[in-house]
Structures are given as C-alpha cells and as structure tokens.
Image (tube, grey):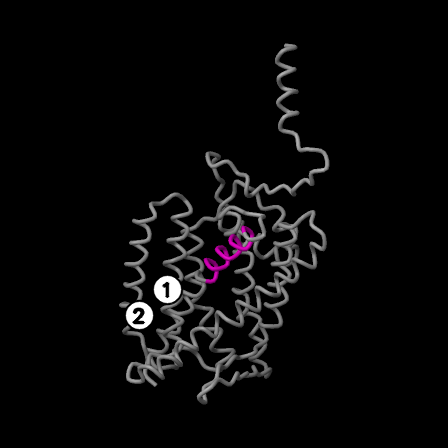
Amino acid sequence: MTMRFGRTMLSRAQHAPLPGTPEEPPNVAAQLPTNRPRHTIPLGTLLWRGVRALRHPHEAFRTIRADEQVPFLRLLLLMVAWGAPYALLHFRTIGRHWLWQSPPRIAWCLLLTFMLVAPTNWFLGSIGLRQVARWLKRPVTAEYAEIAAFYLWIVWALMPLVDVVHWFGWRARGLRVPLPGGFYLSFVAHAAWAFAFPWIVLELTAFFVDRLQGERHCLLKSLGLSVGLLIVVRGLWEPLFGLLCLASQRLAPAYYVGDWWFVMVGSGVGVVMGCTWRTVLRGGGIRTTVLRGALACAAVLLLAWPFRYPR
C-alpha cells in the first residue's frame, strides 16, 4: 500500500503544472474521448433549447454537454421543410405578393432556393464557428459547433415571423450600392434586421465569451469578433451571388439565368459540401467522400439548369 501511494504521488507531481504557469480554461467539448458514446438530443428538446437560447444565450452555450450531438437526418429534413413556408412568408411580406402569383419557373426556383438555403446556413455556421475557435486556440468538437450553430439558425428561422409587421403598413426600404459600369447591388432593409442582427451578435458574443474565459478584456474581444463576423457574412456572402449574376450578364448575356438561380445552385452546393465536410470529420474516407461530393455538385448543377428564368 505504501509503495502504491508513493508512486501515485510521484506521478501526480510529474504531471503537475510548473509554478507560475497560467492555467488554461477548461474546454470540455474539445476533450471528449473518441470512444465515449454520444447522446443524440431529441429534436423537440433541441428546438426548445434553441428558442431558450434567445433569452439565456450564455447559459445555453455554457451548458452544451461534451457527449451530445444533433439528430442530423431529422434536423436536416426539418430545415429543408421550414424553407418552404419561409419563402412564402418572405415574399408575401417583403415582395407584397404570394409566391404562386409569380411565373411557375420563377416560383419553383425561389421555393427550392429557400429550401436549400436553410440547411446551408447551418452548415456554414457550424464550420465557421469550429474554424474560428481553432484560430483562437480554443478548439471545439464538430458536434459542439453544430449545436451552437443551430442556436444561431433559430434566429434566422424566426425572421419571416418578425417581418409580418410589414403587412400593417411598415414598408421595407431598398438600399443600392453603385458599382462601376452602371451596375449596382441592392439590399432590402426590413423589420427582421432589427431583430436578427442584435440577437446574432448577442449569441455569438456568448459563444466567444465561453471560449475565451480567463483572458483579459474577454467581453470586448468577444463583442468585436461577433460584430466583425456578422459584417463579413452579411457584407460579402450575400452580395456574392449578385456579383455572379452581373458577371454572367457581362460575359454571357445570351445565357442569363437570374440572381436567385445562382443562390439556388450555391445553396445546393453548400448542402453537398456541408455533408461532405461532416462525413470527413467523422472518419469517412477522404478520397471516396470528396469524389461523391464532386459528383453530387455536378448533379445539383444539372438538376438546377431547367429552373433558370429569363429576363
């Protein structure tokens, strides 16, 4: 007994941190053993937690357990399904017309676009949060990032419900950014901006505060990162498809396909790349998975081509 006790104390002393060495904040989500079984969160519970994160964001991110994961297939189907009423409400409140009042090809293009945009936003959010956390040297697991990104996705999903106020006379405002050659990029400022932007910043700040615990000026750094990420995503990602549409008009005017068609194709590719990324992170063969992803991207382009719409 004495010998065992002595060896135990010696082992602890060898692994103890040196005096004066600052202790890093615990990163439970990044320290999960790979052989530990994971608990799949029921879809209803995940939705409730996402709505609750609107009121208690810091607690929501802090209490994500290390052995949890999202119900991927059911969640993916839910997001795709929610894209349909999202599109109907969006164009009724902002465009002041029902989607089925548009020409059939345009209506189907817009409907499919939002059904693909919904999961794409979640995929991009989970990949982005994971990569930024790694850049900050506060890594998180892919499962943690997916849960955190779903909390942010809930904010986006609720935007058309906020825009219902436009039915009562509050008109959306159009913004234009002039470009060389007489072109311009247009934005529509609507009521949901006043809801989504502050809440996304609030939840992102809570996420980064949980990652940067123990650092000086933790709250200011987290707030700066949150605002910076929102500006990059809103200011660069969304106008990208408008720029592609302008380029197609200039380079191949006979093959004009419309800006929303680019969004549909980009979102379809985003879903494929998100699934590919997720499979690789979970141990799937890189060559086989990437090849399947490339074939799926080609299939998206071929299937989307009939939905292009004329000038």
Please give the residue where the numbered disc 2 appears in the rendered image.
304
At 40% from the left edge and 70% from the top edge, which residue is drawn?
113
Which stretch appears magenta?
Answer: 121-134
Distance Cα–Cα, label 2 vs label 1: 9 Å
Q: Position of residue 67 (x, y in %)?
A: 52, 40
Rendered image quadrant of residue 273: bottom left
**Which residue is depicted at the point 54% across and 55% down?**
132
The image shows residue 274 at horizontal and vertical percentages of 41, 56
Front-most of residues 200 and 154: 200
Q: Are marks 2 and 1 in contact (CB under 8 Å)?
A: yes
For the residue marked with disc 1, what is the amino acid? Answer: Gly
Residue 122 painted magenta = yes
Going by the numbered disc 2, the residue's amino acid type is Ala
Q: Quarter holding the C terminus? A: bottom left
The disc placed on residue 268 is 1
Instruction: Give the overall secondary structure of the magenta segment.
Output: helix
In magenta stretch: residue 131: yes
Q: Residue furthest toward the bottom?
A: 182
Q: Earlier in the sequence, mark 2 or mark 1?
A: 1
